[in-house]
Image (cartoon, helix red, strand yellow):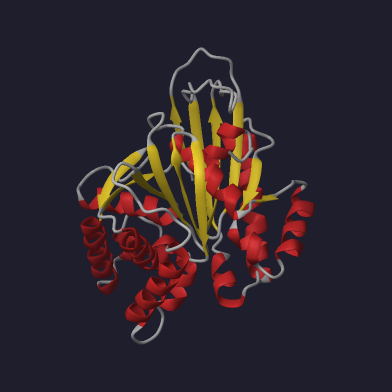
């Protein structure tokens, strides 16, 4: 699937692309426009066009269960990455940046899998540190917001969560948590699962956040991104009767999360998951993602927040791959 948006422009054409090898989806972004020089003070940028594609891989399941990547998942990753590289080439972007996140950071056989992918496809994959992942995500989300505005960004991923905070385009700090939707999905299996998962998340978040993050202040905008967050915005728009496609920013409350959770549970009990505006792979992980997002919001005592689809892929194309 490729989604494309176009704005007319008469500026010089430049095309940049990024493929994010996430724990759930591999996602391609190709953007055409007159890019600013990052850090040069030129903050003006209007994309001429953008196109996106994704492939479900789900190798975060392997990491959550066995701490390694199975041969079956490696084969799926190879096939999916090859398809996205071909899609980028069709969009006149023959050499997109390839960035990998937590699965290729933590898997016990990550180096051999990465080398196999690089050899088979003739590419180079950059495995981001958690700081680099947080920095690029912050760059992508903050660039399109008001200059000088304080912001906290939570990027809720498949096997890790990055939290970054700062003012304007300058990230001032970050925290990386070993919590993601695939791991929470594992916790939610079995008797008394929801209570056990909630207690474990509360304990781990308390230990991780109490000394590493500054208090969230009322003048800072709380923004969420990542697959579960964007899916939450899409599902909420669907419930409200709006077109579910989601691009820029959407305001959500914890009450909205509970509304979505009840609707998801109702569809599951009725065997009508295909009626949801999400694909079946995302629907399988979606309840776990909602549990994790709600636990994070409770830790910050946040009732309302915003969701953006401007993530580390946008940060990668805007900065040319340099972490902010």
Name the image quarter holding the C terminus: top right
Image height of 181 relative to 6, above or below: below
Badge count: 0
Picture coordinates of residue 265, whole percent (x, y) = 27, 69
Nearest the eye: 74 or 303: 303
Report the side of 77 relative to 176 (left or right). Answer: right
Q: Residue at x 41, y 68 (%)?
A: 206
Q: Quadrant of residue 323?
A: top right
Nearest the eye: 142 or 6: 142
Q: Quadrant of residue 74?
A: bottom right
Report the side of 228 relative to 23 (left or right). Answer: left
Q: Quadrant of residue 291?
A: bottom left
Report the side of 248 relative to 38 (left or right). Answer: left
Report the side of 176 relative to 95 (left or right). Answer: left
Picture coordinates of residue 220, whole percent (x, y) = 34, 43
In this view, the residue farthest toward the top is 10
Nearest the eye: 167 or 25: 167
Q: Residue at x 30, y 43 (%)?
A: 250
Q: Residue at x 65, y 36 (%)?
A: 89
Image height of 87 relative to 15, above or below: below
Q: Is residue 308 visible?
A: yes
Nearest the eye: 47 or 106: 106
Picture coordinates of residue 92, whole percent (x, y) = 63, 30
Picture coordinates of residue 202, whole percent (x, y) = 37, 72
Q: Is residue 91 visible?
A: no
Q: Residue at x 61, y 62 (%)?
A: 103
């Amino acid at each position: 699937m490729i989604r494309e948006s176009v704005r007319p422009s008469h500026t010089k054409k430049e095309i940049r692309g990024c493929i994010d090898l996430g724990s759930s989806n591999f996602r391609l972004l190709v953007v055409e426009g007159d890019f600013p020089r990052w850090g040069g003070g030129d903050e003006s940028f209007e994309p001429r066009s953008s196109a996106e594609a994704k492939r479900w891989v789900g190798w975060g399941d392997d990491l959550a269960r066995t701490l390694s990547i199975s041969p079956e998942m490696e084969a799926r990753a190879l096939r999916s990455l090859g398809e996205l590289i071909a899609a980028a080439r069709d969009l006149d972007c023959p050499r997109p940046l390839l960035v990998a996140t937590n699965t290729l950071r933590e898997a016990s056989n990550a180096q051999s899998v990465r080398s196999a992918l690089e050899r088979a496809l003739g590419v180079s994959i950059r495995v981001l540190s958690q700081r680099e992942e947080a920095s690029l995500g912050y760059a992508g989300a903050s660039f399109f917001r008001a200059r000088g505005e304080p912001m906290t960004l939570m990027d809720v991923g498949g096997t890790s969560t990055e939290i970054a905070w700062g003012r304007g385009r300058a990230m001032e700090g970050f925290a990386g948590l070993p919590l993601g939707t695939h791991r929470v999905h594992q916790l939610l299996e079995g008797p008394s699962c929801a209570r056990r998962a909630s207690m474990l998340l509360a304990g781990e978040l308390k230990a991780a956040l109490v000394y590493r993050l500054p208090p969230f202040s009322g003048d800072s905008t709380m923004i969420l991104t990542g697959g579960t967050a964007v899916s939450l915005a899409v599902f909420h728009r669907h419930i409200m009767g709006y077109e579910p496609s989601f691009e820029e920013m959407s305001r959500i409350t914890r009450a909205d999360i509970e509304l979505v959770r009840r609707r998801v549970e109702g569809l599951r009990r009725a065997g009508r998951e295909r009626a949801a505006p999400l694909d079946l792979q995302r629907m399988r992980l979606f309840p776990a993602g909602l549990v994790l997002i709600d636990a994070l919001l409770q830790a910050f005592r946040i009732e309302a927040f915003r969701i953006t689809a401007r993530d580390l892929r946008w940060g990668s194309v805007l900065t040319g791959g340099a972490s902010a």
